[in-house]
Image: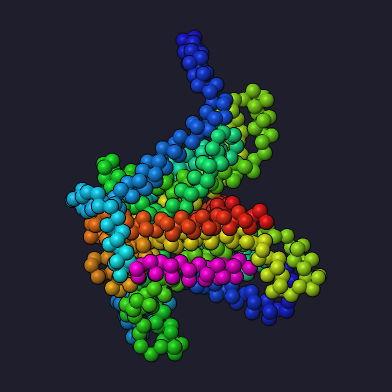
Amino acid sequence: MAVTALSAAESKRLSPRLRRLEDERWLAMALLTPTAVLLGLFIAYPFFEGVLLSLSSTRVGDPGHFVGLKNFHKIWDDSIFRTTVWNTFWYTGVTTVFKLALGLWLAILLNRHFKGKAIVRAFILLPFIIPTVLSTFAWKWMFDPTFSVINWTLFQLGFITTRINWLGDPDLAMTSIIVINIWRGVPFFAITLLAGLQTISPELHEAAAIDGARPWARFWHVTWPLLMPVTLVVVLFSVIQTFADFQLVYVMTGGGPANATHLFATYAYQLGIGTGLLSEGAAISLAMFPFLFVIVVVQLLYIRRVETR
Amino acid sequence: MIEGALWRRWVFYNIPLILFVFVLLFPFYWMIVTTFRPDGELYLPWNAPNYMPFWTNNPTIEHILYLFEETSFMRWMFNTMFIALVSTVISLFCGVLAGYALARLNFPYAGGLGTAIFITYLVPQTLLFIPLAEIIRNFQLGDTPWSLILTYPTFLIPFCTWLMMGYFKAIPKELEECARIDGASRWKAMLYIVIPVAVPGILSSGIIAFTLSWNEFIYALVFLSSPDQKTVPVGVTSELIRGDVFFWGPLMAGALLGSIPVAIVYSFFVEHYVSGLTGSVKG
């Protein structure tokens, strides 16, 4: 009796609140609150703090003061930073082209019926699933100058006579890092593009074939335009992740040899956390922002144009 | 598919596919071989006469034992698991609710908020790690699992929300309207009618969120400092490399064992994972 009375009283007390949730606006607000709080606290607030930090002279153990754009001037004149910017664009551009080409090729190879297709598809995604740092260590061991299995293979095949110091030479080190990034990214491209390919009706291909289109023409005039919207989104994600990459370079070279392979993130880490120049590190990190912003805006506009066409 | 002669099928399909699979999986094979190879064989230069790279006749578990006896590897596994699970649950909770609101409710600025979520989806962790480290320290969360449990949702929630919006949009409005006509409140219709239908989407987002948190590195590297608090990727990096000396055997054993939980989860839910991955790139 007491229990029912209590619950009746409770429901009467709750009912205005529940009735308020009948209003879509109030319900939406209630549902969005947890997300807004977490994202506000750990994205919007740090972004704001980051801007302040990059305009100050803060370092570890010294709160510092406002210095205006001094940090940005300083990194602008920094030759390592210039190398970093160049590296980041080169790394992003080269890997994206290869990931798209190889990923599309792999997707086409997978887009037909054969025995064991499900297993092959499941295994192919492994490089993308396994934590990057852990698989990168396997690569680092494969590229080890003294114990390299790659050197052994090239030597046995007669391509080289002396060892190749993969990570000791700036250009080779960058190339090695690019290879690993492509290795890790191809499965993502392949699987998402495969899903795009599967939405293209085979009848379109048959119709084009009946009209006399050769395989290459069928690909270029049927498959490619229909695949465009998915491709653009996949490229957008990949470009942003690659541009802001950290793990791969940190493990493979740590930015070396002689700061030749830094990306924005690794250089920001080295200055900000490694040497404790927090404000300069924050400035380098934030220097990514305009580039990312332009990439996102251009891509989104382009996607919208393709989709409305 | 237009089928050609047998040799054409091999040249244009089977051989390239075999090469792809070989290259994509070889590093994992290398990881496994190295894990079980004794040190004497491991540190044989590649041009030594008896260098036998692809097999070992003297398999050993000394590297795995080293990992368990000399390092806090079990702690790292436990930490990573705990952090990944809790941050996934938090992100799913927030993402499902927000996704529902953005996909199915009419309210002012719904479109703008959807775009804002998409933009935060694209914010990389490396953009904010330095100010975030300061904030974590100010909140007294440094060197605790909570520093990661609370920050991982910043990249997981936008992802879950985005994915769930896609799933919620695909559920017909009539389903909810029927329940409402039968007297269910909006809240109950959401909880008991719409969300259960979206369970496959929740599973997909959950699995991907779990693998993403297991993979996260830079926050864990910056926010955690004591060996016992570390996650697997950070622990392996910082405790198995001393200066210039790499403990390759234990390092590969750690990489192998540290990948297993993710691989197991993935193997059970491959289809969900793939559908989540492909759903995440739909506009």
Could you tell me if residue B183 is visible in this image?
yes
Give the residue displayed 55% in from the left and 38% down from the top: B110
Give the residue displayed 81% in from the left and 70% down from the top: A210
Looking at the picture, how far across and down is residue B165, in whole percent? Answer: 57, 43
**Depicted B238 relative to depicted B23: above or below:** above
Q: How is the image coloured?
A: rainbow
Please tell me which residue lies in front, B127 or A254: B127
Tell whether B39 sits left or right of A154.
left
Please tell me which residue lies in front, A26 or A13: A26
Quadrant in which residue B28 is drawn? bottom left
Looking at the picture, how far across and down is residue B145, in whole percent? Answer: 32, 46
In the image, residue A168 lies in the stretch drawn in magenta: no
Looking at the picture, how far across and down is residue B203, in whole percent? Answer: 53, 46
Tell whether A175 sits left or right of B277.
left
Quadrant in which residue B44 is drawn? bottom left
Q: Residue furthest right?
A: A210
Give the residue displayed 50% in from the left and 67% down from the top: A96
Magenta portion: prevailing SS class? helix
Could you tell me if residue B221 is visible in this image?
no
**Depicted A221 relative to depicted B127: above or below:** below
Tell whether B94 sits left or right of A120.
left
| Quarter of the figure that contains the C terminus of chain A | bottom right
Highlighted magenta segment, given as a residue range: A82-108
Looking at the picture, how far across and down is residue A123, in whole percent? Answer: 53, 64
Give the residue displayed 52% in from the left and 28% down from the top: A26
